[in-house]
Image (cartoon, rainbow, N blue to C red):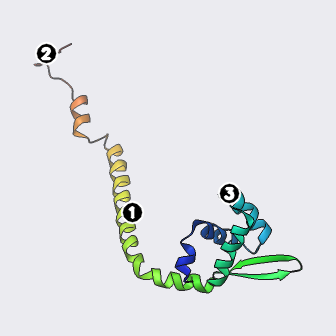
Amino acid sequence: MHAFDALGDPVRRRILELLSQGEQTSGALTSVIHAEFGISQPAISQHLRVLRESGLASVRAEGTRRLYAVEPAPLREIDIWLERFRGFSEQRLDSLDTELARGRRERRLGRRHGGGDAHDAAITQPTTDDEEERP
């Protein structure tokens, strides 16, 4: 199974998130996944098997316990494949950063100069002696 196929399932992605914190026992993983997704222990074991077979996780026996860990190599392969697409999001984020900086600058300059909005200027403009005050 290809790594992307394995990562297509939210339960398996969550298991990998838990494993990213360090090696976990199958019991600890089962407790969290059962609480969050409401699936049975056999179903969770099946997800762990898929992660092992796809190379995303490894297991080692320690007495009667099974300890699972993330295998980084397939994740590096995914990262390399995704690299060609990062330019799209980075350009948008750079543009967003520029616009946010521009907005902060305009607010800072606007406050320094007492506003600057044409509407605010019209409201605060003093009346002349020639104009009548209207109720």
Judged left or right of residue 94, residue 40 is right
Give the Cα separation between the discs numbered 1 and 3. 40 Å
Q: Among all residues in the image, which is located at the extreme top?
A: 135
> What mark, if any, has residue 97 been given in the picture?
1
Q: Residue at x 38, y 53 (%)?
A: 104
Frontmost residue, 118 versus 85: 85
Q: Residue at x 73, y 73 (%)?
A: 22
Give the Cα separation between the discs numbered 2 and 1. 49 Å
> Label 3: how many residues lie within 10 Å, few (<14), some (14-19) or many (20+)?
few
Above or below — where is 16 with respect to 53?
above
> Quadrant location of residue 16?
bottom right
Above or below — where is 26 with respect to 63?
above
Q: Residue at x 40, y 70 (%)?
A: 89
Quadrant location, the C terminus? top left
Circle 2 SS class? loop
> Quadrant location of residue 85?
bottom left
The image position of residue 47, as x and y in percent, is: 66, 72
Task: Tell whether label 3 touches label 2 (CB within 8 Å).
Answer: no
Quadrant location, the N terminus? bottom right
Of labels 2 and 3, earlier in sequence is: 3
Above or below — where is 100 with respect to 13?
above
Of labels 1 and 3, earlier in sequence is: 3
Judged left or right of residue 62, residue 34 is left
> Label 2: how many residues lie within 10 Å, few (<14), some (14-19) or many (20+)?
few
The image position of residue 132, as x and y in percent, is: 13, 15
Frontmost residue, 113 versus 18: 18
Q: Disc 3 designates what residue?
A: 38
